[in-house]
Image (cartoon, rainbow, N blue to C red):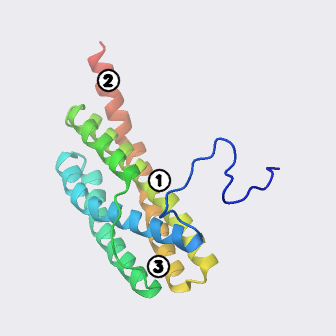
Amino acid sequence: MRPESSKNEPFKGAVQAKSNAAHGLRDLFEVGLKDIYWAEKVLTKTLPKMVKNASSPELVNSLKNQLSETQEHVSRLEKIFEVTGIAPTAKKCDAMQGILKETNGLIRETDIGMVRDAGLIAADQKVKHYEIATYGTLHAFAKTLGENKAAELLAMNLHEEKKTDAALTVIALSAINREAYRADSITNT
């Protein structure tokens, strides 16, 4: 167990918080909402590029469905801002920015076809896993804060992200990964 310290005496090696740091769960909730709001809005611009680079009809369809789902997530987040009284502002999400930068690199570094499709699925699942972690955490925060309407809306987004992640796994395992592996076998013979 760590010894208690006063606000003036941080633990040895602890990083001093900024003056505008989160001081409570409500602050963390607000920061998280603004972060995922930015991420979802950026995804509405990124998914069309992913659609253009996918070749599998199943993957193209999934990505198009995700675009309309993501637009709905943005709308739900705006409703959450409204019901919680938090200003609907987006705060740049460094994690999502990194995942999307990696996705753009993957597109440039893969051949068009099943190899790129396998990479797009992997990249998309990284996005989904980030969203699942974020929505799960925000849902728990909302419940703890007594923000029941927000919790309900966050649970809807969380459920849809999990469902999409599972669908992507099915698409990958149905044929795309095998076809990408065959391309690898052909290249190495």
Q: Residues within 10 Å of mark 3 (few under 14, many from 20)?
A: some
In this view, the residue in front, 57 or 36, is 36
6 with respect to 25 (left or right): right
Looking at the image, is 186 positioned above or below residue 113?
Answer: above
| Quadrant that contains the C terminus | top left
Q: Residues within 10 Å of mark 1 (few under 14, many from 20)?
A: some
In this view, the residue in front, 162 or 154, is 154
Q: CA distance from mark 2 to mark 1?
A: 27 Å
Q: Residue furthest front?
A: 8
Q: Looking at numbered disc 1 in the image, what kind of residue is underneath it?
A: His
Q: Name the disc covering residue 184, or none.
A: 2
| Residue sitting at x 21%, y 53% | 51
Judging by the rendered image, the residue that carries numbered circle 1 is 129
Residue 118: percent from left, percent from top: 33, 39
Q: Looking at numbered disc 3 in the image, what kind of residue is underneath it?
A: Leu
- Which quadrant would residue 60 be assigned to in this image? bottom left
Q: Residues within 10 Å of mark 2 (few under 14, many from 20)?
A: few
| Residue sitting at x 60%, y 83% | 146
Q: Secondary structure at mark 3?
A: helix
Q: Earlier in the sequence, mark 2 or mark 3?
A: 3
